[in-house]
Image: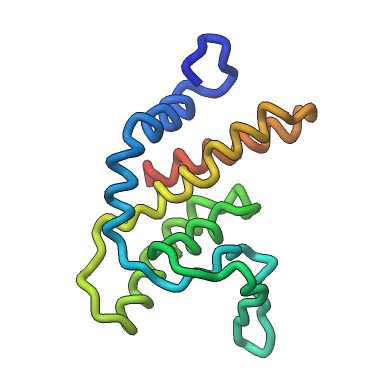
Amino acid sequence: MRSKDCEFPQHVRQMLIDIDEHADEILARIEKLPIVLCHRDFWVTNLIYADGKFAIIDWDTSGWGYLGEDLASLIADEADIDHMVEYYQRCVPAYYKGFSEYVDVSPIADHCVYELILLVFGYRLVEWYLYSEDDNEKTKHVHTLQKIYEMKEA
């Protein structure tokens, strides 16, 4: 990321450098979030929609985690890249509104979903890019990082 030879756009490189340089501060903010039951494998293939209702399957990795972890996975894990920013903008407020209807907590202004997405998937996308031999896959990974960048700007 810091090399002049890096092929990533400068703003994407800076986004990854910033998350690295501020990791301690970001992790401290995340640690202030409520601990909740998390699915821990929450992505579209583990959601079933039938008869007007959703069901979540594959609970074998469930456990305790920070509020927003599952939402970060749902938005970023093999998501529809072209709609990631829209999903982020729509789902984050709905998630916290729904949570607050059932749990007595003060409003969470600093939800950290963006940071969770970047911490969990940013480095993974860089790794996939580096080890991919397919130019289309490389382009997809950079495009996904671009969409993560756009979430912060939205």
Within the image, what quadrant is residue 135 found in? Answer: top right
Query: Looking at the image, which is closer to me, 59 or 114?
Result: 59
Image point (54%, 44%), residue name: 121
- The scheme the figure's colours follow is rainbow
How many discs mark residues in the rendered view? 0
Image point (69%, 66%), residue name: 45
- The picture places residue 10, in percent across and down from the top left corner, at 47, 21
Query: Looking at the image, which is closer to me, 96 or 151?
Result: 96
Image point (35%, 29%), residue name: 21
Query: Looking at the image, which is closer to me, 92 or 59?
Result: 59
Vertical position of residue 5 compared to residue 47: above or below: above
Q: Is residue 44 left or right of residue 20?
A: right
- Spot the residue most to the right: 134
- The picture places residue 85, in percent across and down from the top left corner, at 49, 51
Within the image, what quadrant is residue 24 found in? Answer: top left
- Spot the residue most to the top: 4
- The picture places residue 89, in percent across and down from the top left corner, at 42, 57
Vertical position of residue 40 compared to residue 18: above or below: below
Vertical position of residue 86 compared to residue 62: above or below: above
- Spot the residue most to the bottom: 51
Vertical position of residue 116 compared to residue 45: above or below: above
- The picture places residue 61, in percent across and down from the top left corner, at 60, 67
Q: Is residue 57 left or right of residue 99?
A: right
Image point (41%, 26%), residue name: 14
